[in-house]
């Protein structure tokens, strides 16, 4: 693309787009020449007022349309309603239907909901009206389905891990809402009450047919245990924590930090990855499961739109998946590419929903 510049606006390094000729039509500087300061000073001494410069075409602005997949959204909303109904029935009336669970967990639903990178982008891009608790459990169930696939588990193990994720926090229905939604810090007594939700959830499901499946039951009870023994409710150490408990701990932390809550705004997935990795290095979270989750989720975030700390919006266009702490290259609405590994003054604040883009 050619652009005309006044001679006094020329800069060294610019590429001449058309021959620069003198008043007799003689060529002074040929097309394709890279200008130097001496060349520019020479032009300033002549009756030449403008020069054509060759410039690259501006990068096209990234694509914004169709961020939400209609089929995915319909499926998600249907499963959300079914899960919400199951929670209410079990907590309020002690009712549990294995047939209703089987209908909710049919292959069509979870083939759609656990569809790789699309699943990650859709749960970030959707707005979520209704119960945060139910949305959180559904997100963890979806992430559990992805983890089961990434690990190469059998279909039965994948199925059970998804169920454990879906019922992960049902015990919070037994915790006073004012504690779960409290702004600011909890007192020691209040925190002790909130911590009981893992046991409450286990006990609620102990009276159902799910009690026969110890993978599911242990996963729900142990999702707040930590490998160094600092978790709850039993202060188990790694060798005593089930594989479901170790995986669900990671998924629970990720979605809780990357989602809007009553008392906290959602955070950048890359901040969450840093927190997860610090906990891995500190011996709190499982190394194998944690690193695998971060690596695969990084890949799935490609194409998502983000809000940057400088106020701009941009789309993730590249991530180096070989490095756990890698940051993305982002293309802004103006088409500019920013490598956040090199430009540390700018950070990703959060993934944007479709309505925010």
Image (spheres, helix red, strand yellow):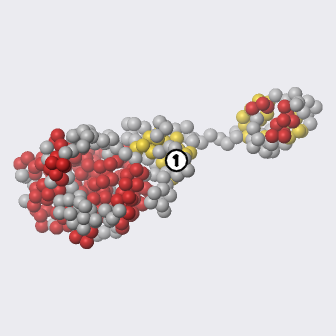
Q: Is residue 29 above or below residue 208?
A: above
Measured as percent of width and height from the top left, residue 137 is found at 24, 51
Say which residue label 1 marks.
Answer: 344
296 relative to 221 in the view: left or right: right
Image quadrant containing the C terminus: top left
The residue that appears at 55% across and 37% down in the rendered structure is: 334
Give x and y (percent) for residue 105: 22, 57
Of 299 and 223, which appears nearest the observer?
Answer: 223
Task: Tell me which corner region of the image, top left, top right, bottom left or bottom right, holds residue 337.
Answer: top right
Q: In the image, residue 155 lies at what x, y percent?
A: 27, 67
Can residue 139 be spotted in the picture? yes
Q: Is residue 149 visible?
A: no
Image quadrant where residue 226 sits: bottom left
User: Where is residue 209 drawn, in percent x and y?
Assistant: 10, 62
Q: 325 or 302: nearer the eye?
A: 325
State whether residue 302 is above or below residue 228.
above
Label tally: 1
Please give the name of the residue rendered at 16% of the width and 51% of the height, measured from the top-left corner: 192
């Amino acid at each position: 693309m050619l652009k005309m510049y006044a001679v006094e606006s020329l800069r060294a390094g610019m590429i001449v787009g058309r021959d620069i000729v003198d008043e007799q039509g003689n060529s002074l500087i040929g097309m394709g020449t890279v200008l130097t300061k001496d060349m520019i000073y020479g032009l300033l001494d002549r009756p030449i007022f403008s020069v054509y410069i060759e410039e690259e075409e501006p990068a096209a602005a990234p694509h914004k349309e169709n961020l939400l997949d209609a089929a995915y959204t319909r499926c998600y909303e249907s499963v959300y309603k079914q899960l919400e109904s199951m929670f209410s029935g079990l907590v309020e009336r002690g009712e549990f239907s294995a047939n209703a669970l089987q209908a909710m967990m049919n292959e069509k639903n979870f083939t759609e909901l656990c569809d790789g990178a699309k699943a990650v982008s859709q749960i970030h891009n959707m707005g979520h009206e209704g119960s945060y608790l139910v949305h959180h459990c559904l997100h963890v169930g979806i992430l559990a389905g992805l983890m089961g696939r990434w690990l190469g588990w059998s279909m039965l193990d994948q199925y059970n891990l998804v169920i454990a994720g879906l019922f992960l926090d049902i015990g919070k229905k037994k915790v006073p809402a004012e504690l779960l939604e409290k702004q600011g810090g909890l007192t020691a007594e209040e925190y002790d009450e909130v911590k009981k939700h893992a046991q409450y959830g286990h006990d609620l499901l102990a009276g159902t047919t799910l009690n026969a499946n110890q993978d599911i039951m242990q996963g729900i009870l142990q999702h707040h245990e930590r490998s160094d023994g600092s978790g709850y409710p039993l202060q188990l150490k790694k060798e005593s924590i089930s594989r479901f408990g170790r995986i669900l701990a990671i998924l629970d932390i990720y979605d809780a930090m990357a989602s809007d809550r009553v008392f906290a705004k959602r955070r950048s997935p890359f901040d969450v990855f840093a927190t997860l990795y610090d906990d891995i290095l500190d011996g709190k979270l499982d190394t194998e499961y944690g690193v695998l989750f971060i690596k695969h989720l990084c890949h799935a975030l490609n194409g998502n739109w983000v809000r940057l700390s400088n106020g701009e919006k941009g789309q993730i266009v590249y991530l180096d998946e070989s490095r756990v702490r890698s940051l993305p290259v982002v293309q802004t609405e103006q088409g500019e590419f920013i490598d956040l590994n090199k430009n540390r003054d700018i950070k990703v604040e959060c993934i944007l929903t479709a309505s925010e883009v």
